[in-house]
Image (spheres, rainbow, N blue to C red):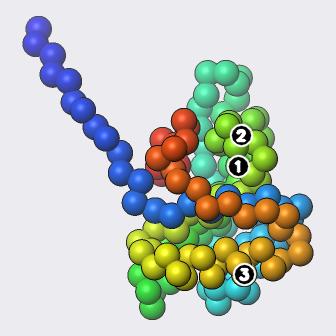
Amino acid sequence: MKTKKLKYTPEFNFNLIGISSTDDDYKLSWHLSEILGLEFTRSSGLEIIDSRFSDFQLFSIYETSDDNHGNRIKIVSNKGNAGFLIDELKNIDYFVIIYDFENIDLLDKLIVKLKSITSISAVFKLNPANLKSREKLLF
């Protein structure tokens, strides 16, 4: 039987920000709602089956869309019920994924605003292509 191999290279067409914070996910989504003037809603979450764990991993997700600028934004917890979403970034509590956003100046301003929140201890601009577990961010 003939087999064909498909070569697939995923595109990471989003901006990624890592946040270390003492806030719970709902409190962080409230802070981002205040900063951005958008309303985040909790989605059903992200379930990942990993052979290292007996149960599936569950990560919380809050999302919104900015109809004025055509952006979609998600807040994803890095710490789930059984391990981390991105294992190599255990110091990061949440990821902010911004789709369809090209303006680097506004992204830098958002990072400055995030750093001004007292419950956020660190903010990182990340390149998803440099992460080993980057495929977990494609959902």
Q: Of callouts 2 and 1, which one flags the residue occurring earlier in the amino acid sequence?
A: 1
Say which amino acid is labelled 1. Answer: Asn
Q: Which mark is residue 113?
A: 3
Say which amino acid is labelled 2. Answer: Phe
Q: Which residue is mark 1?
A: 78
Q: Which mark is residue 87?
A: none
Q: Between marks 3 and 1, how big is the CA–CA gap?
A: 21 Å
How many labels, in total? 3
User: At which x and y percent is residue 90?
Assistant: 75, 42
Q: Between marks 2 and 3, how big is the CA–CA gap?
A: 26 Å
Q: Between marks 2 and 1, how big is the CA–CA gap?
A: 5 Å
Under circle 1, the secondary element is loop
User: At which x and y percent is residue 68?
Assistant: 45, 91
- 118, 135: nearer the viewer: 118
- 83, 106: nearer the viewer: 106
Residue 53 vertical position relative to residue 81 in the rendered view, above or below: above
User: At which x and y percent is residue 115?
Assistant: 77, 74
Q: Which mark is residue 84?
A: 2
User: At which x and y percent is residue 101?
Assistant: 44, 74
Specify whether residue 132 is in view.
yes
Q: Are marks 2 and 1 in contact (CB under 8 Å)?
A: yes
Residue 64 vertical position relative to residue 44 in the rendered view, above or below: below
Specify whether residue 39 is in view.
no
Under circle 3, the secondary element is helix
The residue at 76%/35% (across/down) is: 82
The quadrant of the picture occupied by the N terminus is top left
Q: Are marks 3 and 1 in contact (CB under 8 Å)?
A: no
Give left or right: position of 67 versus 57.
left
Q: Of callouts 2 and 3, which one flags the residue occurring earlier in the amino acid sequence?
A: 2
